[in-house]
Image (cartoon, rainbow, N blue to C red):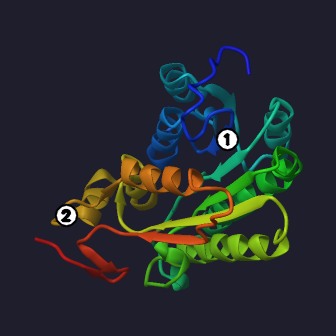
Amino acid sequence: MSGVSLPPADLPGSGRTAVVTGASSGIGAATAERLAAEGFHVVLGARRLDRLTELADRIGGRALPLDVTDPTSVDAFVAALDRVDVLVNNAGGAFDAKPVAEADVDSWQRSFEVNVVGAVRLTKALLPALRASGAGDVLFVGSTAGMISYEGGASYTAAKHGVHTLAETLRLELCGEPIRVIEIAPGMVRTDEFALNRTGSAEAAEAVYRGVREPLVAADVADCIAWTLTRPHHVNVDLLVVRPRAQAAQHKVHRE
């Protein structure tokens, strides 16, 4: 890809191209930065091209506009790629915290479009290139919300349960092919936008983390992602659950 210099041959990602979606902020941005440091050629995709371009310039990556909910955008993104060895399906988010009785159906639809359908759309489009690489990786950034339900979280937990079963099913369907399917399921991660987008106010977002000593940050999750992708290719980390020490379970959080 033009403008990207080759990394030293002894780095784990040398010669491999990694696509990271939702790369303009949070876990996606941290993952793009970490994979670039590991020697991958990183292609960053997101809607906010100004933020994306700034990060790509800093890490020596390539920024391309991408809206995973728009088939035309996905088609244009895929057409611009010469090679893909790794796909990090990170684009996602939570958009409300209402009980089912007060469900905002638009938020439900948005949650499924971004978290589930978008991941399906891009995975389907890039599978031929991942097969052709001879050692492809599809990584889904899921959530512990994809394994347990809780009040006020139905639109998000339902979507992340969808991501979890998507990863499990794809792994079964690709068994015997040279493609690993990996899922990273973080618990509480403090980023600039996740809780704010979900609650709609800075005060409510701050309350999510209040009193929690050392919640995870985006770089912690990026570290886990990079570790799974740099194992020998016969090693498939099916599912990696990662929480802060202060969170023993989805409903059990120690607050000081």
Comparing labels 1 and 2, the label whose residue is closer to the camera: 1
Q: How many marks overall?
A: 2
Kindly tell me whether residue 191 is visible in this rendering: no
Give the image location of residue 248, x and y in percent: 30, 80
Residue 41, visible in the rendered structure: yes
The numbered mark, 1 or 2, whose residue comes first in the sequence reads: 1
Left or right of 131 on screen, residue 22:
left
| Label 1 Cα neighbours within 10 Å, binned few <14 / some 14-19 / many ≥20 | many
- Residue positioned 40% across, 50% down in the render: 218
Q: Mark 2 points at which residue?
A: 210
Q: Where is residue 190 in the image (x, y as percent from the top left)?
A: 33, 55
Which numbered tag is attached to residue 103?
Answer: none
Residue type at numbered disc 1:
Val
Answer few, some or many: residues within 10 Å of disc 2's Cα (few below 14, many 20 plus, some between 14 and 19): few
Element marked by disc 2: loop
In depth, the one of 110 and 244 nearer the eye is 244
Residue type at mark 2 is: Arg
Horizontally, is 198 left or right of 14 in the view? left
Outermost residue, front direction? 10
Name the spot of residue 172 as percent of width and height, x first. 79, 76
Q: Mark 1 points at which residue?
A: 19
The residue sitting at 39% across, 53% down in the picture is 196
Q: Is mark 1 on a helix, strand or loop?
A: strand
Q: Which one is in front, 103 or 123? A: 123
User: Label 1 to label 2, Cα distance in Å?
Assistant: 34 Å
Q: Residue 172 versus residue 108: which sits nearer the camera? A: 172
